[in-house]
Amino acid sequence: MIHIVTSQNRHLYGPQLWAMHQQRREQCVEKNGWVDLVVLEGGEIDDYDDLSAIYLLGFDDAMRLEVGLRLHPTEPRCMLADKFPHLIAPEETPKKGPDVWEATRLFTTEVYRAKKGPGRGARVFEVWAAAMELALINGVSRFVGMIDMSLYPGILNSPIDTRLVGLPRPYAYGVVAGSEIALSQALLDRVREAIGMDGSVGYHVDELDLRAFGDLAAVQRQAISAQVPQRRPGSARDEQLAAETLYRLNDVFGEARRIWAERDDRRQADQLNA
């Protein structure tokens, strides 16, 4: 499960978002040496961390941060197009528009990188799958961004088709290139297949989830259990809640949330009238 954090539910993720900013400082400033970035009280932050920013975060069972990615609509601002236009070839299509989002600040943490065994590395593709799900639902057809060319060989071997939009250029910390990912259901299906998922990866937690399950860790456990088929009787999970959570995981039009909200209102009214 990847948590989708937007302006609507950001207030539920105070400590988790601060951990993200701290990890960005460790990755971008301390590890990569990007000393021109802004560090405030131990966390890296920039002017794209505004109300339009969407954060995709993955946690382990103890809610320790493992992976993160930021998405941002390119209207009216785009880091690639506005600050690094020299990375875009003249014949390229515009990199700003209502159907274009920018993907930046991808990272994994030491907690995750220390893991061994099968599936190591899958979390990066999980966060990309969640990003693609959200983008396609919102009518987004492309991600744009920038790639340090030291990472490009690994990108070429991934299930995600990433295209350079101009010639790589030297910068203060190596060589960088502008990039674009053309989004489609076929690409999302391929990424899901690569990580062994056949359903939704991202989940947007709200107050209804917290009232139903208690806290973010419990919501995560429930969402994960809902995605795992029950192969024998006697499971400790609540099958009704698992079914409802699975419904919400695939709730493209918000119908499941509306049903949950109406039922929650009725339950509260019954308690008041009791």
Image (cartoon, helix red, strand yellow):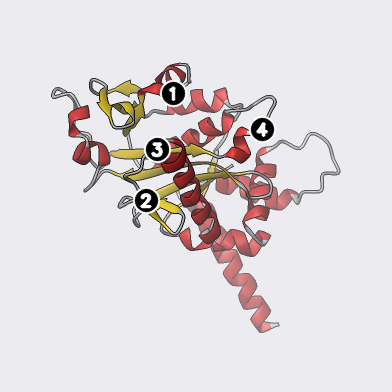
Name which residue type carries label 1. Ile
Name which residue type carries label 2. Ala
The residue beneath circle 1 is: 160
Counting residues from the N terminus, which is met first, the one under dot 1 or under dot 2?
2
* x and y percentages locating residue 3 in the rendered image: 53, 47
- Give residue 53's mark: 2
At 41% from the left and 42% from the top, the residue drawn is 29
Instruction: Tell me the quarter of the image containing the N terminus.
Output: top right
Q: CA distance from mark 1 to mark 2?
A: 22 Å
Name which residue type carries label 3. Gly
Counting residues from the N terminus, which is met first, the one under dot 3 or under dot 4?
3
Is residue 205 rendered to the left or right of residue 44?
right
Circle 4 or circle 1, nearest the eye: 4
Q: Image quadrant of residue 85? A: top left
The residue beneath circle 3 is: 33
Is the residue under label 3 in contact with that under label 2 (CB below 8 Å)?
A: no
Choose between 122 and 240: the one closer to the eye: 122
Instruction: Tell me the quarter of the image containing the C terminus.
Output: bottom right
Q: Is residue 252 placed above or below 40 in the rendered structure?
A: above
The residue beneath circle 4 is: 115
